[in-house]
Amino acid sequence: MRLAALVAGLFLSLTAFAAAQSYDTPEALLEAFYAPYLDGEFPEDDAHFRSAALQALYEGDAEITPEGEMGALSFDPYVDGQDYSISDFEIDAPLIEGDTAIVDVSFRNFDEPRSLTYELVNVDGWKIDDVVSANPANPYRLSEIFAEAAGE
């Protein structure tokens, strides 16, 4: 009985540690963020990857979306598509200015080249603040998608 309680306690401690992890570099953040796309093991909650501002946009969208309906996002902005099969993932050197960074990532999604620009902030570790795609077939800025859905 005590062993089961110890194991459960250890599991909860390790889970809390993983969820609260801080990323010391932009590359570490993006490597950790994209790991589930490469290994298929997605966390239940990925809010710890997002800045407070980006998280507020996700939460605001959830509040204005009627139950059972799709919110502002009809695709996954982090793979620039609805489905994914990621290969050739690369993180470019970040451009860091104080507590902000701009980082380009590139990959192939179903063998189609993709390139995204991440705008990051360093508040208790690096966090995703916005994502931009210059894909001619589907250009977007994540924050603008949420703003448009909110009628702003």
Image (cartoon, rainbow, N blue to C red):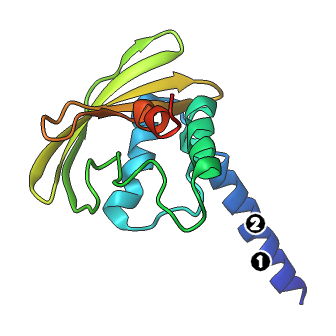
Q: Position of residue 16 (x, y in %)?
A: 72, 56
User: Which residue type does callout 1 highlight?
Assistant: Val
Residue extending farthest to the top is: 97
SS of the residue at dot 1? helix
Q: Position of residue 50 (x, y in %)?
A: 55, 38
94 in relation to 37, above or below? above
Q: Which mark is residue 7?
A: 1
Q: Quadrant of residue 15?
A: bottom right
Kindly identify the residue that appears in the image at 54 percent across and 36 percent down: 23
**Is residue 88 left or right of 31 when viewed as pictured?**
left
144 in relation to 78, above or below? above
Residue extending farthest to the front is: 151
Quickly name the residue at label 2: 12
**Is residue 136 left or right of 68 when viewed as pictured?**
left
Q: Position of residue 45 (x, y in %)?
A: 60, 57
Kindly identify the residue that appears in the image at 45 percent across and 67 percent down: 41
Kindly identify the residue that appears in the image at 23 percent across and 34 percent down: 139
User: Which residue type does callout 2 highlight?
Assistant: Leu
Kindly identify the residue that appears in the image at 36 percent across and 65 percent down: 39
